[in-house]
Image: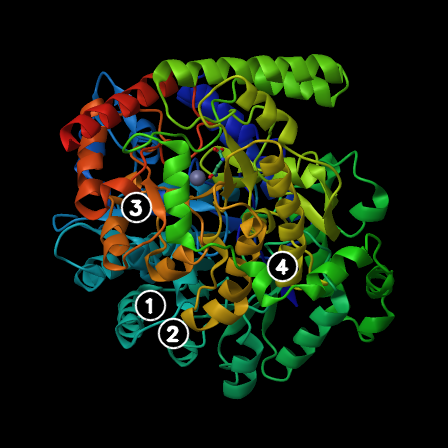
């Protein structure tokens, strides 16, 4: 049996690519120096994979920012506003990724969206009626050549034609179907080039096949590949799916002239069933995703072996694969020097997953698999009882009843009480929570962590930052203030560290978007609140101002979604345990005089199952109640805010309203405010702050621009329900752009108020 992976993390074990790119953005290094770092990462990854004995090593899984953006550049789907800037190819690429504001012009970045049900974000390609899809890029060929020079004939990885067309946004009247011909021709060209270069396999990533597919979708998929595959020459084509099963198109997949089909047996609920019911074509290779690419637990060889045994009944030609790209897990356990071995032995990051694949291969090939040393060691590990149980928490969760999830009095009543209490102006202004995390703050936190800065020095340092931040917000004239979240490294990790049941890691970075990485904490045992987590800072911040100071928490669903979850209890059970802990914090804040509390559910949309038929049962039925439980115990005059990243919740708008928050802020500026119509159509009850500018980009929005956004919002949202705020937290920004941006925001709000009278 052979082994394969779908892709490898490209940020570098110590985030070398991130740091080099950021230096490049600050003009501290040249493009050549950046390229040198990139090359080192690629060559390191290559040698690691080679050493592990991996049979199919991917190339072109490397990206300076995002693989979908790479594909847009490969296929000439780059709007003129970027190409006409007259920048180098690399800088044009970064302009599309991050926006550009400089002597050559002022353009916004591509929109950014969550990558299926992960916390990775891709850049949304824009296609308009004049776009001409054709093969213009060379990156896949260059990287294939580079690996070849290093002695490895790789399997190049490219986003597939169907997925590319499904992910793009169509700005004109033409739709995906109208570009099918051109796209198929471009991919055919790509295959021809790889024939010339001597590639043996190419992998087309088609994760969109695991979503609900309409008859037209299937038609589009089939027609694309009917045109592409006749041009494959001697290159074998693997169609790789992940993040679910392909129940809508399994037959078509098997019928097309692919040489390999990649299926996900980890997240694909029905993958095995599909193979069992329909068989697997004789002339194709099955790339079986049995090693979880999304979680960090060691593979359970016994369960994996069961799957392989089942599959073997239907095909002899199996390649052992990961369930998705390893992009979604950290690089290597070697950098986790502080994690106790009793936990660490249960972990497998990308590098360790390579070892797992090699071991599973050995086991699967053995005459007596269960007799192998590797199998026995793994079985012993998985049979150890797990520490970290908390009976009290389990009992509390079990005792929850319907009424625990209902806040009274109902919304309209509370809205009146709160309007009278806060007396805020029309279009109140606020921010989402964090203020710029400057180098000074990060280094103080590091020093504190290492014990080089005493607790009391660190605390006074943070207090000073909070005081400055409050003064700044007063000066700018914001209405509802925040403390700035300077004490937090990350909105989830911070809470993970304050909760019992969590483990946290040192270097377990995972790419979130571009150069931004997150370090998800690990749910190990039952969760409970060991001590108050934020009260001290919020109370201090409130003491500095007469304006309302928002308490700032992360909600249970987001905490869970941005953690590596347990696999031995259900997500629902974990979410409710976390909800219990956050509720205690909410009540504590309220008791300590905090009148507005924001519970961020930034990631709520993210883990919505990819198929609609799974939404309720597998997710919303517990996620929405978990949020409601967090605030159902507060007084009517306490105002509950929530914040969600990304406005892609048109289809669950009722559920969002049902979270029963008093105010919700969310991203809108990057998606052209399309969500506003949906809010209006659905008589959205919750007060809303659709972000008026994009904080993911360093450009400063002008007052006029913000006013234009506000007037658009005014057409759809009743004035008394509209808040004005940026679209997300400001922690990744610098003060240089934050201060003028917020000043413009406040001035725009003031003018809008005057015009409204
Ligand atoms: N309150 C958080 C912040 O401002 C929210 C971040 C987020 O939505 N990702 O940083
Ligand atoms: Zn956000």
Question: Gap in Å between the C-alphas at discs 4 and 2?
Answer: 28 Å
Residue at 72% from the left image edge and 59% from the top image edge: 396
Q: Position of residue 291 (x, y in %)?
A: 64, 61
Mark 1 or 4 closer to N-term? 1
Q: Nearer the viewer, residue 64 or 539?
A: 539
Query: Is disc 1 in contact with disc 2, using a CB cutoff of under 8 Å?
Result: yes
Is residue 86 visible to the viewer in this orientation of the structure? no
Residue that numbered label 4 is attached to: 292
Q: Quarter for ligand 2?
A: top left
Mark 2 or 3 closer to N-term? 3
Residue that numbered label 3 is attached to: 72
Which tag is nearer the camera, tag 1 or tag 4? 4
Say whether residue 686 is left or right of residue 661. left
Q: Position of residue 64 (x, y in %)?
A: 43, 35
Residue that numbered label 2 is attached to: 257
Mark 1 or 2 closer to N-term? 1
**Label 3 packing within 10 angstroms: few (<14), some (14-19), many (20+):** many
Question: Gap in Å between the C-alphas at discs 4 and 3?
Answer: 28 Å
Say whether residue 303 is left or right of residue 596. right
Q: Secondary structure at mark 4?
A: loop
Which tag is nearer the camera, tag 3 or tag 1? 3
Does ligand 2 reach within 8 Å of label 1's beta carbon? no
Does ligand 2 reach within 8 Å of label 3's beta carbon? no
Q: Position of residue 180 (x, y in %)?
A: 22, 62
């Amino acid at each position: 049996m052979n082994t394969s992976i779908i892709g490898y993390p490209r940020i570098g074990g110590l985030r070398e690519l991130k740091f080099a790119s950021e230096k490049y953005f600050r003009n501290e290094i040249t493009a050549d120096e950046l390229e040198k770092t990139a090359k080192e990462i690629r060559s390191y990854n290559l040698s690691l994979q080679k050493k592990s004995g991996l049979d199919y090593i991917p190339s072109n899984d490397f990206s300076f920012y995002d693989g979908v953006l790479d594909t847009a550049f490969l296929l000439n789907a780059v709007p003129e506003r970027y190409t006409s800037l007259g920048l180098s190819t690399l800088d044009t690429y970064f302009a599309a990724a991050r926006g550009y504001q400089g002597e050559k012009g002022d353009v916004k970045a591509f929109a950014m969206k969550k990558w299926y049900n992960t916390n990775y974000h891709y850049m949304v390609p824009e296609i308009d009626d004049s776009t001409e899809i054709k093969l213009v890029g060379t990156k896949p060929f260059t990287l294939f050549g580079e690996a070849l020079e290093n002695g490895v004939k790789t399997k190049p990885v490219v986003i597939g034609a169907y997925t590319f067309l499904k992910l793009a946004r169509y700005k004109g009247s033409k739709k995906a179907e109208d570009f099918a011909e051109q796209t198929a021709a471009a991919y055919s060209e790509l295959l021809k080039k790889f024939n010339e270069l001597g590639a043996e396999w190419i992998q087309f990533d088609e994760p969109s096949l695991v979503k609900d597919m309409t008859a037209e979708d299937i038609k589009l998929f089939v027609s694309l590949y009917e045109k592409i595959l006749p041009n494959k020459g001697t290159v074998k084509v693997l169609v790789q799916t992940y993040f679910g099963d392909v129940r809508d198109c399994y037959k078509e997949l098997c019928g097309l002239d692919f040489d390999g089909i990649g299926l996900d047996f980890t997240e694909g609920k029905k993958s095995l069933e599909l193979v069992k019911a329909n068989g697997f074509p004789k002339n194709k290779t099955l790339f079986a995703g049995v090693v979880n690419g999304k979680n960090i637990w060691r593979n359970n060889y016994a369960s994996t072996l069961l799957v392989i045994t089942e599959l073997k009944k239907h095909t002899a030609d199996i390649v052992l694969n990961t369930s998705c790209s390893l992009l979604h897990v950290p690089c290597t356990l070697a950098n986790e020097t502080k994690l106790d071995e009793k936990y660490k032995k249960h972990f497998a990051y990308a590098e360790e997953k390579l070892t797992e694949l090699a071991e599973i291969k050995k086991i699967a090939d053995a005459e007596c698999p269960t007799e192998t040393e590797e199998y026995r060691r793994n079985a012993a590990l998985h049979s150890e009882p797990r520490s970290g149980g908390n009976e009290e928490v389990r009992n509390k969760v079990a005792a929850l009843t319907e009424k625990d999830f209902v806040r009274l009095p109902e919304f309209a009543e509370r809205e009146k009480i709160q309007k009278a209490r806060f007396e805020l102006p029309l279009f109140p202004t606020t921010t989402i929570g964090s203020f710029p995390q400057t180098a000074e703050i990060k280094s103080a936190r590091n020093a504190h962590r290492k014990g080089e800065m005493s607790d009391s020095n660190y605390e006074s340092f943070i207090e000073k930052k909070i005081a400055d931040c409050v003064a700044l917000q007063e000066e700018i004239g914001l209405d509802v203030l925040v403390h700035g979240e300077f004490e937090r490294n990350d909105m989830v990790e911070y809470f993970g560290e304050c909760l019992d049941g969590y483990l946290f890691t040192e270097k377990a970075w995972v790419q979130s978007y571009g150069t931004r990485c997150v370090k998800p904490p690990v749910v190990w045992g039952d969760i409970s609140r060991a001590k108050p987590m934020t009260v001290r800072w919020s109370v201090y911040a409130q003491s500095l101002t007469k304006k309302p100071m928002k308490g700032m928490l992360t909600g249970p669903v987001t905490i869970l979604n941005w953690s590596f979850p347990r696999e031995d209890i259900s997500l629902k059970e974990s979410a409710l345990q976390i909800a219990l802990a956050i509720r205690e914090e909410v009540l504590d804040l309220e008791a300590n005089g905090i009148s507005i509390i924001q519970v961020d559910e930034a990631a709520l949309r993210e883990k919505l199952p990819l198929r609609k038929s799974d939404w309720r049962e597998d997710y919303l039925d517990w996620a929405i109640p978990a949020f409601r439980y967090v605030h159902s115990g507060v007084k009517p005059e306490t105002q509950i805010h929530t914040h969600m990243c990304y406005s892609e919740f048109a289809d669950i708008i009722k559920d969002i309203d049902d979270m029963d928050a008093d105010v919700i802020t969310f991203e809108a500026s990057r998606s052209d405010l399309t969500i506003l119509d949906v809010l209006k159509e659905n008589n959205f009850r919750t007060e809303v702050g659709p972000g008026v500018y994009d904080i993911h980009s360093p450009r400063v929005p002008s007052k006029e621009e913000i006013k234009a956004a506000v007037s658009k919002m005014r057409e759809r949202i009743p004035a008394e329900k509209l808040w004005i705020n940026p679209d997300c937290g400001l922690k990744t920004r610098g003060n240089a752009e934050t201060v003028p941006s917020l000043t413009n925001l406040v001035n725009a709000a003031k003018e809008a108020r005057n015009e409204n009278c």
